[in-house]
Image (tube, coloured by chain):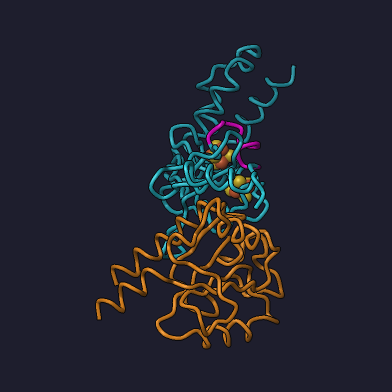
Amino acid sequence: MKRHIILEGIRGSLNPFTTKYPKKSYIPPDGFRGAAEYDAERCVGCGACSQQCPPGAITYTDDEKERKLRLSYGVCSFCGRCEEVCPWDAIHLTKKYELAVYNREDAETGVDIPFFQCTECGRPFFPYPQMKASLEKVGETLAEYGIKQEELANLISLCPTCSFTVDKMPERRMFMRRLVK
Amino acid sequence: MNLVRWSRIRSPWVFHFNAGGCNGCDIEILAALNPRYDIERFGMILRGSPRHADVLLCTGTVTRQIRNRLQRIYEQVPEPKFVMALGNCACTGGVFQNCYNVHEGVDKVVPVDVYVPGCPPRPQAIIDGAVKLLTKLSKS
Ligand code: SF4
Ligand code: SF4
């Protein structure tokens, strides 16, 4: 027999080649694209991730109070597009890969985002964190035009049905005019 | 009786069936079978015939053409039999969801015991699924 085969055999029995996986946990290398997870603190509920997900793994349903974003690991192709498009840096691919489940519905994650209620009719119509974050984002630009943040906040806190009424239109027009310098 | 149960848990022979996948998961199964990951540690030996197997390892979204074959193969596995849906296509249809020619998952055709999501699942994920299946077996 060849010498290197014997050496290989000895080396193999001293230092087993087989991983000890279930006993010893295994962490995938950097750059591994595992299960995506939401950062509930940061997600504003805009739904951009759901629009861009190629296989349609992310869906959202709007009910009375909140927007329910759900990501099904059984559909996700672990491409990382959601992480790429999220404007608020709120979804990330983790290194989690142990996703086996007994029921199809269990392999999912998600967040519930509360809605903002129209100040006039009380109808929930827009994700609350998104409204807050957007206002903060445009604050500086508004200041350039001499508009206070509260003015815009008042204007957008009405649902579409309440804001496009005959008696509200002049006010909206005036506001728009101030934006055109 | 206990001996039968013990041997069942210690030697779940598997039959691998590709029901219309892209081969990604099948390659990962081969990786899980090779000495590096060595799924034979759990007594899982790949068999060439469903009649010798306890576990049906199914990959791929079930295409319309293969549906009857999958059913026939499932019926050929002797009782008690277990099905492992491997990869996203087998779990839910994955990227092929809403295609005209697929059944969107193995569970639409035969009952599934454990789902292993991943596109494809890495060998460790397959081992994890196998361990979860064996845990279920030992509890039942
Ligand atoms: S903030 Fe990011 S994670 Fe939340 S809904 Fe929008 S795109 Fe998705
Ligand atoms: S990783 Fe890709 S497939 Fe998975 S949820 Fe994100 S966008 Fe969708």
User: Residue A120: x, y in percent?
Assistant: 44, 40
Question: Going by the picture, which residue comes out furthest to the right?
Answer: A181
Q: Tell me, yes or no, whether the highlighted magenta stretch contains residue A88.
A: yes
| Front position in the image: A168 or B116 | B116
The answer, for residue A167, to whether it is visible in the render is no
User: Residue A34: x, y in percent?
Assistant: 55, 44
Question: Going by the picture, which residue comes out furthest to the left?
Answer: B2
| Front position in the image: A164 or B140 | B140
| Front position in the image: A80 or A118 | A80
Q: Which residue is drawn at 63% across and 74% down?
A: B62
Q: Residue at x 69, y 63 (%)?
A: B23
Chain in cyan on the image: A
Q: Is residue A35 above or below residue B61?
A: above
Q: Tell me, yes or no, whether the highlighted magenta stretch contains residue A42.
A: no
Question: Going by the picture, which residue comes out furthest to the front?
Answer: A1
| Front position in the image: A15 or A157 | A15
Q: Which residue is drawn at 48% across and 62% down?
A: B40
User: Residue B68: x, y in percent?
Assistant: 63, 86
Q: Is residue B113 above or below residue B73?
A: above
Please state the total of marks drawn on the protein image. 0
Q: Quadrant of the C terminus of chain A?
A: top right
Q: In this view, does A53 lie above or below B24?
A: above
Q: In this view, does B131 lie above or below A169?
A: below
What residue span does the magenta drawing correspond to? A81-90
Which color has been applied to chain B in this rendered view?
Answer: orange
Q: Is residue B2 left or right of residue A171?
A: left
